[in-house]
Image (tube, grey):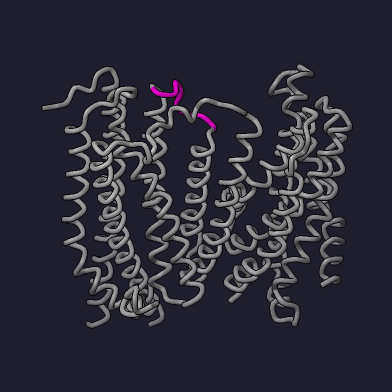
Amino acid sequence: MRTILGMKYFWPYFWKLANPKVFMRWSGLCLPWLIALTVLCLGTGLIWGFFLTPDDARQGSTVKIIYLHVPSAFIAINGYFVMVLGSLFWLVRRQHVSVLVAKASAPIGMTMTVIALTTGAIWGQPMWGTYWVWDPRLTSFLILFLFYIGYVALWAAIENQDKVADLTSVLALVGAVFAVLSRYAVLFWNQGLHQGTTVTVADGVNQKNISSIFFQPLLLSMIGFGLLFLTLLLVGTRTEIRAQRLQVLEGLEKLK
Amino acid sequence: MIQLFTRDVVLSVRSGGGFGLALAFFLIVVVLMPFALGPDQFVLAKIAPGLLWLGALLACLLSSDRIFGMDYEDGTLELLATSPLPLESVYLAKSAAHWLTTGLPLSLAAPVFGLLLNLNLKVGGVLCLSLLLGTPALSLIGSFGATLTLGVRRGGLLLSLLVLPLYIPTLIFGALAVNAAALGKALDGSLLSILAISLGAIAVLPFFSAMALRANLQ
Amino acid sequence: MIPDLGKYAVEVASAYSITFLLIVIISFLYWRRGLIIRRRLMAAEARKDA
């Protein structure tokens, strides 16, 4: 099975990236191409979406916000996922690169959460008549944002790198469990208190019933946002690797 | 482990740091609310369940940074780490002591304070029950947060930032249960969900907290 | 060839501009921190080798 999926050839090379030197070499090679590809995909996707798609019959031109809202929400969740995986690998394998990937991922994910929330609010005002409703989806995104803030704040609070790596990883894992729990609790809560709200009627911008005119540019801008995330992740991780090396060198200088 | 537990209970009762203070804080929150929202009995009764849960939760949170703080500062925690007692048990004993000195009194006092907010005693009973089931989770999560912020000077604000999002599921189910009781509806599993969160916290959090303690003590 | 955004022009324009602004800000911050750290590291390496 492993061979069929090509995993036999993938994982050994993947884990080699945990060596900082290998990571720096490979990421340095990839980065210019990634940046170019990001600009290309994001540019085409958004220009296509903004200039070349028709207005929706019901939503008018606000439908164009979807090319920002859905991709950023997608990255916001996956950014947390990357963070959790990096933390898990750090706790199990003790290789610094993985926890630095997690560290670099958090601010990007946080920004994407803000983008998703604001674009959603801007879209919600004309469509739902309000910037904010305590709909389960919206609420869980706000909670996700709170978890990001806590994680970033903990990184900023402690000097000792190994210690803070352990602590933030523990927080990321426990946070993930509670984030999922909150997602379901919130579902329960809204049902319990506001039965039969009509908010979800306006949720017509569902991926399943979206026509292909809107879907193709959306797909392209989703790929673009994904590449943007990857690019920033590599840049951030490279910086953190260098920062760690810098800290070691400065520590040595102090010893002398 | 039991010795550690009794030691912590005795210490917090004697020093007056946590025991009465959390309760007094809870009372003050409850008393201030009518000033903020007006004395309308109907309005008060409507918001009382959520308010009492929130007050108890904040009282629990504010007392939790002292769980490990003192022992970390005077070196007791390092002694405990070198003792044969695993850090998981240290965490459990300390959380249990915290619950006994804050969670339990808060739960018992909540129906009485509820009377101030025009909450009838029958609903108060459900409130008391939901708090009894939920405060263990609050204590466990609070002291987990305390293990994370151990080395941070003035960690109180950071502790709240880390812990409050983790409190959300417990708060949701707790307020849900009491609200359902206030409306005379069936409890539809909210109490069971709170119990599940508490049990899950007991099962999972000791390992993560011990990891955090080890990272802080190395 | 700006498309006619109809009565929702303000909404759509502000959504796009806020998003661009945030993306530019985070990219700029990542880039700047990378530059600062790289310079400091190069200086430190030079001192070590000297």
Front-most of residues B52 and B132: B132
Please indicate whether residue A253 sits to the left or right of residue B174 in the image: left
Magenta stretch containing residue B39, yes or no?
A: no
Residue A249 appears in the picture as rendered: no
For the point 27% across and 80% down, the residue is: C48
Residue range highlighted in magenta: A127-134
Magenta stretch containing residue A133, yes or no?
A: yes
For the point 73% across and 22% down, the residue is: B35
| A204 w.r.t. A239: above or below | above
For the point 74% across and 81% down, the residue is: B83
Front-most of residues B157 and B41: B41
Res. B120 image quadrant: top right
Classified by dominant secondary structure, the portion drawn in magenta counts as: loop
Q: Position of residue A148 (x, y in %)?
A: 47, 51
Q: Position of residue A96 (x, y in %)?
A: 41, 73
Q: Position of residue C7 (x, y in %)?
A: 28, 17
Residue C30 appears in the picture as rendered: yes
| A229 w.r.t. A48: above or below | below
Q: Position of residue A68 (x, y in %)?
A: 31, 39
Quadrant holding the C terminus of chain B: bottom right
Please indicate whether residue C2 sits to the left or right of residue A152 in the image: left
For the point 51% across and 57% down, the residue is: A154
